Image (spheres, rainbow, N blue to C red):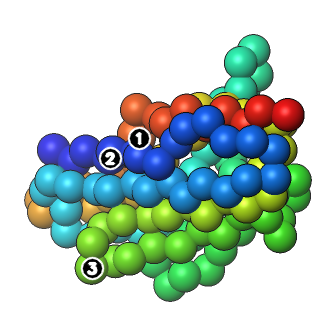
Amino acid sequence: QVQLVESGGGLVQSGGSLRLSCAASGSIRSIDTMAWYRQAPGKQRELVASITSSDSTNYRDPVKGRFTISRDNAKNTAYLQMNSLKPEDTAVYYCKAVVTSRNYYTMDYWGKGTLVTVSS
């Protein structure tokens, strides 16, 4: 079994910064792509940023230049540094990881989410 736990969310003023963390634990052989998604009230969940095991990154256009995704493979942890936050960034942020378990079974795992609220 694999668990993903997000942390680092909270309330911040417009223009402020937050750093989210996503720690994976359990029966892990390897982790491929790790990604951050977000879901605002009344909206569909959307991809924010992703990073492959070779550190290739991809960002949603509205966050380019403001958000940075990174990972620490030794800690099975991904990060999302969010700068110049805007009220429209308010959402629950979820982590997703493509994990191969010790029995060589590969599947997507999701965390439970962390709330980010940006006040104007």
Q: Considering the image in quadrants, where does the N terminus appear? A: top left
Identify the amino acid type marked 2: Leu
* Residues at marks 1 and 3, CA–CA distance in whole angstroms: 20 Å
- Which-is-in-front pick, marks 1 and 3? 3
**Do labels 2 and 1 touch, CB within 8 Å?**
yes
- Give the image quarter of residue 44: top right
Q: With 77 as the anchor, is 83 left or right in this view?
A: right
Instruction: Answer above or below: position of 22 versus 57.
Output: above
Identify the amino acid type marked 1: Trp
Considering depth in this image, is 107 or 16 the residue closer to the camera? 16
Instruction: Answer above or below: position of 56 versus 19.
Output: below
Report which residue position mark 1 lands on.
110
What is the number of the mark on residue 74?
3
Q: x and y percent of residue 12 in the render?
A: 67, 42
Q: Earlier in the sequence, mark 2 or mark 1?
A: 2
Residue that sits furthest to the top in the current view: 42
Report which residue position mark 2 lands on.
4
Q: Residue at x 44, y 64 (%)?
A: 78
* Residues at marks 2 and 1, CA–CA distance in whole angstroms: 6 Å
Q: Residues within 10 Å of mark 2 (few under 14, many from 20)?
A: many
